[in-house]
Image: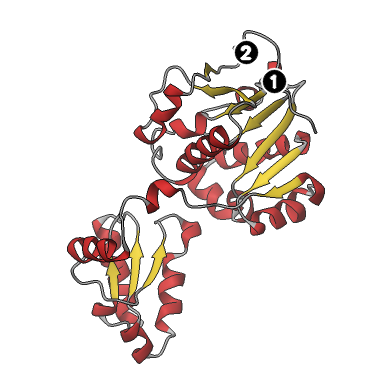
């Protein structure tokens, strides 16, 4: 498909998520917008943002792009219409469907980034945790039926979309979750990284096994600890388990107790925090 210069609209409001602006899906949207503006700046005409919500520090670069556009249900481009309208985060809780896919964009080619189908795959748990919002989230998956192209950040999510939503495989493109060089450039050498790590976490040992998780049900922290407990003791001693995520104090205590009950030595489980 030929794309006219300046005719792509990026709905990047996901980067303004109040509770998660510097991590998770919000950070993914930020870095994806940055990459698209670097790779094909001539094609991007607008970066839609909520004019009433501030940008997180990591997304401040958008202010210098000259492409920011206020995005609301009734406010689209002042001139012309996008040839491509890209919804970068369809699961924003504070937006209704007609705000995510406004009437003014419906003559455009619709592209949606699908991050996962976890509230659908774990529906019982998420219905209990989220209440009516779980049903609302699942209902908006109908947006994918109208999309000409679906982007996923993993092969697993692509397969889930085919199996559970019956999206045709030729409408799905796996674009992956590449790590931004903004992270790798924070330190100059491996030795510098090791020194910072030892200073922040004096109890960490070389050769550790890293798990990046969270307290959410889908992260399955207890399952990860249970799997680690199945390793032979000498292997655990050689590869300390470092669990990185934000944990309330009571959750730290319960996880440590859980690990001890499974026979994991306290020296071999390190809860690093966020």
- Provide residue 95's location: percent of width, then percent of height: 55, 27
Q: Quadrant of the C terminus?
A: bottom left
Q: Viewer-proximal residue, 63 or 247?
A: 63
Kindly indicate whether the residue at mark 1 contacts the one at mark 2 (C-beta within 8 angstroms).
yes
- Distance, label 2 to label 1, CA atoms, is 8 Å
* Disc 2: which residue: 77
Q: Is 242 placed left or right of 170 in the picture?
A: left
As displayed, is residue 109 above or below residue 217?
A: above
User: What colour scheme governs how the chains and residues are painted in the rendered image of this protein?
Assistant: secondary structure
- Provide residue 240's location: percent of width, then percent of height: 32, 77
**Residue at point 38%, 37% (across, down):** 19
Q: Is 250 placed left or right of 44 in the picture?
A: left
Disc 1 crowd, CA 10 A, few/some/many (<14, 14-19, 20+)? many
- Provide residue 96's location: percent of width, then percent of height: 59, 26
Q: Viewer-proximal residue, 7 or 41?
A: 41
Q: Which mark is residue 82?
A: 1
The image shows a total of numbered marks equal to 2
Q: Quadrant of the N terminus?
A: top right
Q: Can residue 174 be seen from the camera position used here?
A: yes
- Provide residue 115's location: percent of width, then percent of height: 59, 47
**Residue at point 46%, 71% (across, down):** 223
């Amino acid at each position: 498909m030929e794309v006219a210069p300046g005719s792509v609209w990026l709905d990047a409001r996901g980067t303004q998520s109040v509770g998660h602006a510097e991590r998770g899906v919000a950070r993914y949207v930020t870095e994806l917008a940055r990459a698209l503006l670097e790779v094909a700046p001539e094609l991007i005409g607008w970066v839609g943002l909520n004019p009433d919500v501030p940008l997180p520090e990591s997304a401040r670069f958008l202010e210098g792009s000259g492409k920011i556009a206020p995005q609301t249900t009734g406010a689209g481009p002042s001139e012309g219409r996008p040839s491509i309208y890209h919804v970068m985060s369809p699961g924003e809780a504070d937006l209704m469907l007609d705000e995510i896919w406004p009437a003014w964009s419906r003559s455009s080619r619709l592209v949606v980034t699908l991050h996962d189908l976890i509230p659908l795959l774990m529906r019982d748990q998420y219905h209990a945790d989220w209440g009516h919002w779980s049903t609302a989230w699942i209902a908006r998956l109908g947006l994918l039926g109208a999309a000409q192209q679906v982007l996923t950040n993993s092969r697993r999510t692509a397969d889930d979309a085919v199996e559970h939503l019956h999206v045709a495989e030729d409408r799905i493109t796996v674009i992956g979750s590449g790590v931004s060089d903004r992270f790798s450039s924070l330190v100059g050498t491996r030795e510098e990284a090791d020194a910072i790590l030892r200073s922040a976490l004096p109890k960490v040992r070389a050769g550790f096994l890293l798990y990046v998780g969270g307290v959410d049900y889908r992260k399955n922290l207890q399952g990860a600890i249970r799997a680690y407990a199945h390793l032979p003791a000498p292997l655990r001693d050689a590869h300390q388990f470092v669990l990185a995520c934000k944990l309330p104090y009571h959750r730290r205590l319960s996880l440590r107790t859980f690990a001890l009950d499974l026979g994991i030595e306290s020296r071999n489980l390190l809860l690093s925090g966020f």
